[in-house]
Amino acid sequence: MSNNQFKKSELYSFITGVASTAIARRLQKKFNQADLSLTIEQWSVLYHLWKEDGISQQDLCKATFRDKPSMTRLVDNLEKAGMVRRIHSKADRRKNLIFLTERAKEMQDTCYSFAEETVEEALSGVSNDKIEVCKEVLKIVYENLR
Amino acid sequence: MSNNQFKKSELYSFITGVASTAIARRLQKKFNQADLSLTIEQWSVLYHLWKEDGISQQDLCKATFRDKPSMTRLVDNLEKAGMVRRIHSKADRRKNLIFLTERAKEMQDTCYSFAEETVEEALSGVSNDKIEVCKEVLKIVYENLR
DNA sequence: TTTGGTTAGTTGTTAAAACAACTATATGTC
DNA sequence: GACATATAGTTGTTTTAACAACTAACCAAA
């Protein structure tokens, strides 16, 4: 049975995401040291808004892989911190469209550098081929479980 | 520059651990459906106790990659739920040794099956070679960031 | 044996995750 | 238009994460 070898070995790290936890903590530390007062979860929301501003909370849920209550509170906190604004959609009054403030727009480059730096530290010594394999597998996992 | 291709692509999933989040949620769902009333975080503690019973909270911190306050509360909740007991170490009175109750011991096989099932669902369609590459990369990441 | 540093664990606080229950708006069907 | 159903977002509750500050016990050096 081709799968048997795997079964007995480390399922633990696949389930608990030790590696991604380590990466997230490292990035959080960089944010803190730079006095950015931004959580990784907040960053994950901004990440998508930097790509496309003014999308709905529901869009952000799908993009960040979080549920609606989590997003409500993330947006609450981002709004309190002056990084986004909720604007009621005129086309669909159920929707809030989320817009970046100037302050948040200015943070994009800094945050991107920290993220890039972190991922490069994490993956130092790993060949591009292997990184590609990982990305591929992560994508399959994500789709298998959706 | 050999790294350039990677830089511009998805760092997001590496940092946020979307795949491991999906796996953990799937396993949690299986626990819930079986009325196990066990969180993934609690499971991650039991996982190590099933391998070696009676280790200290500090040992569990290292094994589960969590900090001391988190472990205090995880053990609190596991104790409340009747799954572990704290026993003061006689050799070193600072230490609590954590022991599984009979009830928790009986849960091992069930939980293991669910975990194995989940990982197999997650990785269905992924060749063993690629799984090995992933495991290798996760390990390197973990060590790069320690 | 006293001092100073280290290790093990706890407590307090804020942010987030997961789930259920809820309101409000939109949409499709008769 | 009226109804059922689906979608968008909020609120309440419990558990966990991360960090700082703390107590207690251990250990090593003077």
Image: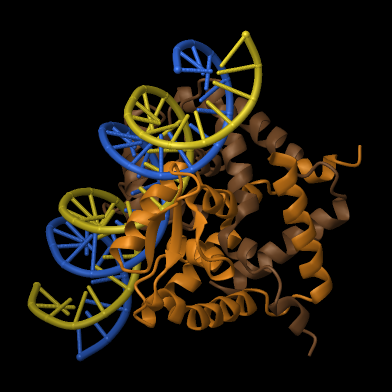
Chain colours: A brown, B orange, C blue, D yellow
Look at the image and tell me whether residue B13 can be seen.
no
Tell me which corner region of the image, top left, top right, bottom left or bottom right, holds residue B81.
bottom left
Residue A19 coordinates in the image, percent (x, y) = 65, 51
Q: B44 or A26, which is in the foreground?
A: B44
Q: B16 or A75, which is in the foreground?
A: B16
Q: Quadrant of the N terminus of chain A?
A: bottom right
Residue B88 coordinates in the image, percent (x, y) = 40, 52
Which residue is the extreme one toward the right? B1
- Residue in view at x 60 percent, y 62 percent: B19
- Residue in view at x 37 percent, y 69 percent: B83
Residue B6 coordinates in the image, percent (x, y) = 79, 45
- Is B76 left, or right, of B12 in this rendering? left
- Residue in view at x 50 percent, y 78 percent: B108
| Residue B1 in the image: above or below residue B24 | above
- Is A103 left, or right, of B144 in this rendering? left
Look at the image and tell me whether residue B10 can be seen.
yes
Q: D4 or A64, which is in the foreground?
A: A64
Tell me which corner region of the image, top left, top right, bottom left or bottom right, holds residue A77.
top left
- Is B137 left, or right, of B36 in this rendering? right
| Residue B21 in the image: above or below residue A25 | below
| Residue B124 in the image: above or below residue B93 | below
Number of callouts in the render? Answer: 0
- Residue in view at x 33 percent, y 55 percent: B76
- Is A121 left, or right, of B87 in this rendering? right
Residue D12 coordinates in the image, percent (x, y) = 16, 53
